[in-house]
């Protein structure tokens, strides 16, 4: 439990092992539209890269673009 009084302290967020571990891989696709006020996000699609058909589809769309 952090102390509630005293000077501010920075606490690094490091695990106990060296290196890194991948917990989740995702791909996302942003669809934008131009408006009089500038570019706006129309849709964001996020897929976990788990080998499923929706995951493969979003990657195929990226390659085809």
Image (spheres, grey):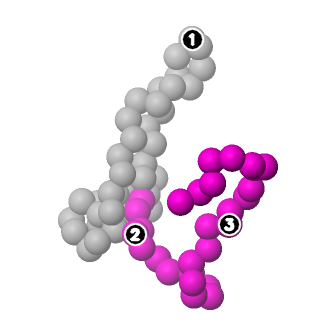
Decide if residue 53 is on the left or right side of residue 23: left
Tell me the number on the disc at residue 64. none
Q: Earlier in the sequence, mark 1 or mark 2?
A: 2
Identify the residue at the far left of this view.
53
Residue at left offset 22%, top offset 68%: 52
Dot 3: what SS?
loop
Reading the image, the residue beneath label 3 is 12
Let me know if residue 18 is in the magenta part: yes
Reading the image, the residue beneath label 1 is 36
Which percent across, then down, holds residue 25?
41, 68
Q: Earlier in the sequence, mark 1 or mark 3?
A: 3
Which percent across, then down, holds residue 46?
36, 51
Residue at left offset 57%, top offset 87%: 17
Q: CA distance from mark 1 to mark 3?
A: 43 Å
Query: In terms of depth relative to the viewer, which is nearer, 6 or 11?
Result: 6
Q: Earlier in the sequence, mark 2 or mark 3?
A: 3
Query: In terms of depth relative to the viewer, which is nearer, 33 or 8?
Result: 8
Q: Which segment did they paint magenta? A: 1-27
Camera-near label (1 vs 3) is 3
Quarter of the image where one finds residue 9: bottom right
Tell me the number on the disc at residue 24. 2
């Amino acid at each position: 439990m952090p102390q509630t009084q005293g000077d501010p302290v920075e606490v690094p967020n490091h695990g106990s092992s060296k290196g890194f571990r991948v917990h989740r891989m995702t791909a996302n696709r942003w669809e934008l539209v131009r408006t009089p006020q500038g570019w706006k996000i129309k849709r964001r699609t996020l897929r976990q890269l788990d080998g499923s058909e929706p995951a493969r589809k979003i990657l195929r769309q990226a390659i085809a673009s």
